[in-house]
Amino acid sequence: MGELLAKPDVPLVDHLRDVLLLGKDIALRMGLGERLRAQALLACGFHDIGKATDSFQQHMQAARAFEEAKARSAPETELWQLRRVANQKKAKAYPHALASLPFILAAERYLGQQNGWDLYCLSATGAVLTHHSPLGPTLYQGYGVPDFHPRLSEVLNAVLEVLKNLGIGPLPTGQQFLVDLGSLLKESPADILRQAVSFAAGKRSSLLGLLRELPVQEFAQVKAVLHLADWLASAGRSQASIFFLSGGSGRVSAHVSSLALREFQRQAAASRDEVLRLRAPTGTGKTEALLLWAGDTERLLYLLPTQATVNAMWRRLQKIFGKERVGLAHGHASYMVHKEQDQDSLDARLFGSVFARPVTVATLDQFILAHLHGRHWEVRRTLARQATVILDEVHAYEPYTLGLLLAALEREPPARLALASATLPLSLLKLFPDGTLVEAENDLWCRTRHRLHLRDKSLKDSVNEVIDAARDGRRILVVANTVQQAQEIYRIVKEAQGIGPVYLLHSRFVLRDRQDKESKVDSPTPGTVFVATQVVEVSLNISYDALFTELAPIDALVQRMGRVNRWGQEPPAPVHVFCQWSDGSEQVYGRKVLQRTFELLQTLGELPTDRDLADITSQLYDEIIASEDWQEELRSGRQTVTEIQNILGCYTIDLSDDDMRARFTARRGHISVEVMPANLISEAYGFRESNEAWRLPELLVPVPIYWLKCMPEAFTPITDLGCYQTNLPYNSETGLEPSADWLQRATIPIF
């Protein structure tokens, strides 16, 4: 057997050297102190030394044979046989992270003794052990002694030489290292993990338990350096600069160079404060102000409420900073990257998901789940702490989500933080860290974009008015509070004669149909009628001529109103608010909130200014936030973060645990799960057979998770597709549509 391999085409020594050099640059750019930098480089140097086993090298040789056969276009039967052999060898290979344990443990303890570190300062050990498998109590149970390769010492000597050249030491020579390890190499590393040790004033624990008790931020930083360097080397990249933004302010300045900056934008650009609070009406340049404030940050994390808003901002920021610099992080990010950039590389998918791109646009859920110890939490939280974080549309979150967010920010504040919204009540701002308040100038708040009509009737009873307005050539937006109501209104309008196209959009469409509809409604022709639910509030950059909407909380109404006469360039657009609400509306928002909203709306004139709308929004928020129910939800969110982090320490959350899985969510209330309509199943298998499995998210539709519990006969797990099938009727025109009988039999109201 020739040289030892890390990958079929990469020698092990070369890979370890590459990871070490990249790790050095990353640790320096991240500003790690001398000790943490040394631990990070130890982790980089020893993380794959466990690949120097007979079983792993047999796997690599089999994998190399398969790759060589594929390169020479070998017959399919030969490729199948070689792939089968490679997979068999892979299954038998000793876990290399576990085989690396004796080496990193000995190296870290030796270096610690030489430099006066705490005896149990073992973040590098924890990082190496878990760089492929999350740290947890059942990690690597039942493994025996590794079958180390005779040429192990060559790799060890090479690693020690590179570490020495990087100034990490003193460390023993390779031969002395092996002598010092002695009996450790004859023991099962899995047993070493579970051996009792004494620490923390006589407290006893296993080594695995000790790793759980490591300082969380130190462990996360060391593991983040290792992961980033390893992933970068595996992607064939040689520069750590890919993770850091340079010249960001110049790019933003070029973007706004053709604009006449408003005063609030200039104030934001001049601010150097660590916390910025920005309040500006829709369509006045809030995003540009935030980017100007961010300036020359090396890392920018832009957080938004929904996947649709994130996708839109991702496209927008790519035009400013370039595609290579802007990452995407949400539940379907891999699909979006593959679809829009035709990329399926490791760095395209992974770097975005862990906030590693210099600019990352993500849903708030991704940020929060990192603080609930989801997969790769160490990298996400380390990079978020070093980032300029923008929380846009911060008004859009329920109190439980806000509690999670506030606890995360308090426990690990980012380098800089901006809060922004068109409706940013002071009572909400008081929950966040103090900072400068930058507000749009008065003339922007004095715009009268809407003519308000409060109607003492229901929206459904006023459909003929919608049709008449469309026949007059106006572009009409209709917003209902429930999916069922929107579907019913759509059917009626669809049958009308003499109007333009009619569209329906709500949350019960599969991703493909929803994206298709979103693309069609952004440039409406005269006479268009767009019927929607709350999905329009923070997702679509559209501007219609008139709004017909059910009564909803004021902040939701303001967002809906922002979708007509969006930029205020036309005379005030008619906004019809129908104040006889349905039972469904009451179950979504609550009677008290709807009643108080109605009362506040009555205090407005026919031509409310943006300031008037912001003021009554603040009034409603003041009352809601002061309520005991709201405060209890806020406390519950805060408590969840504290409890999970205290329970887990440095462990990653175990989602096979029912209690932990129930807590692993950034939202409360109507939690959704994605299912696949039965009439799309054959298409899903077609995607798999044509090597387009990445397209499976196109065929999934979200439904409330309690549907699966109260009506289990309507849902069947499909193991090989990794989702549930539903036999509820679905079509691309109206979406998922349970029958009235099905809805009546549900034990929980379904909207």
Image (tube, rainbow, N blue to C red):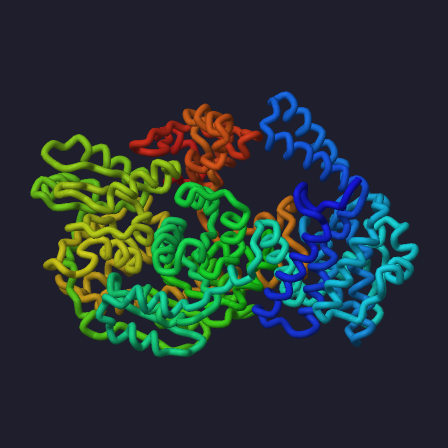
- Which residue occupies 22% across, 42% down? 530
Pick whichever, 469 or 327, lies toward us.
Answer: 327
How many numbered discs sit on the rendered protein? 0
Q: How far across and how far down the image is residue 723, in percent?
A: 52, 34
Q: How far across and how far down the image is residue 668, in percent?
A: 48, 52
Against 336, is 158 above or below? below
Asked if residue 523 shows in the view, the reply is yes
Residue 632 lies left or right of residue 309; in this view the side is: right
Against 532, is 397 above or below? below
- Which residue occupies 86% across, 48% down? 188
Q: How far across and how far down the image is residue 121, in percent?
A: 75, 68
Image quarter hosting the C terminus: top left
Which quadrant of the structure image shows residue 336? Answer: top left
Which quadrant of the structure image shows residue 372? Answer: bottom right
Residue 590 lies left or right of residue 628; in this view the side is: left
Residue 568 lies left or right of residue 407; in this view the side is: left
Q: How far across and how far down the image is residue 120, in percent?
A: 78, 67
Image quarter hosting the N terminus: top right
Pick whichever, 111 or 430, lies toward us.
Answer: 111
- Which residue occupies 71% across, 60% down? 43
Asked if residue 646 shows in the view, the reply is no
Pick whichever, 738 or 23, lies toward us.
Answer: 23
Residue 467 lies left or right of residue 141; in this view the side is: left
